[in-house]
Image: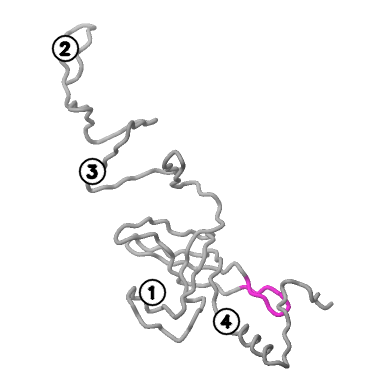
Amino acid sequence: MPLPTNTPYLRPTTGKNNIKGALDSLIASHISQIGPSMLVQVVDVSAEPASITGKVTVRPMVQQQDALSRPLAHDIIHNVPYLRIQGGTSALIIDPKPGDIGFIIISGRDHTHAVTTRQPSPPASFRQFALQDCVYVGGFLNNGPNQFIQATEQGWRIVTPGTVSIEAQGEVTINAAKLSANCDIVTNGDVKAGSISLTQHTHNGVQPGSGDTGPPR
């Protein structure tokens, strides 16, 4: 049965016996060969140590179509560098996970040398706007997370089902009107309230029997 001519998925036909039709066909052919930025899904992640960003393998989510509107899957794209929010030696490290949905941005030229050396480099070939030359930015359309840092009108909120670890070579300073903790507090060091040490303070007015000592000092 012939396909309907009013389907929105079929390209409009152009006359082949005129210059405009020939030019339109030629331009459309060239445009179709340009790799567009598109939604992709992460298939695999190669996460490097914290010292360097890793790469992902992704699958384009918007499929190709033939002249009869039949879907054709894109090939999987390997070794795609992914975005890390970083400035100098400071970074927010959240590596992608398989199943994440994100976006790829296509380079205009073959960026293989620049990715490999991480230095300004000439293009590795005459390839232009190819899907192989892309970077991954995530994520879009993903499910809600179970751990996050959220900015609200009331302030910042940190939620995690696991633990929170703070590592600092210097001091950790908290300036707040009040610090509340609904949990046990354990420390290997001392705790001081003003000038009074929790582990080294003494009491005055010590006496036998049921009397109370004086306050710590």
Secondary structure character of the magenta stretch overall:
loop
The residue located at (45%, 86%) in the rendering is: 126
Among numbered discs 2 and 4, the one appearing first in the sequence: 4
Judge whether residue 93 can be spotted in this image: yes
Marking on residue 206: 2
Identify residue for label 1.
Answer: 115
Left or right: 8 in relation to 179: right
Q: What residue type is disc 4 on? A: Gln
Left or right: 3 in relation to 37: right
Quadrant for the C terminus, please.
top left
Categorize mark 1 by other alpha carbons within 10 Å: few (<14), some (14-19), many (20+): some
Which callout, 2 or 1, points to the residue nearer the camera? 1
Categorize mark 4 by other alpha carbons within 10 Å: few (<14), some (14-19), many (20+): few
Q: Nearer the viewer, residue 125 or 98?
A: 125
Identify residue for label 3.
Answer: 171
Which callout, 2 or 4, points to the residue nearer the camera? 4
- SS at mark 1 in the image: helix
The residue located at (57%, 69%) in the rendering is: 60
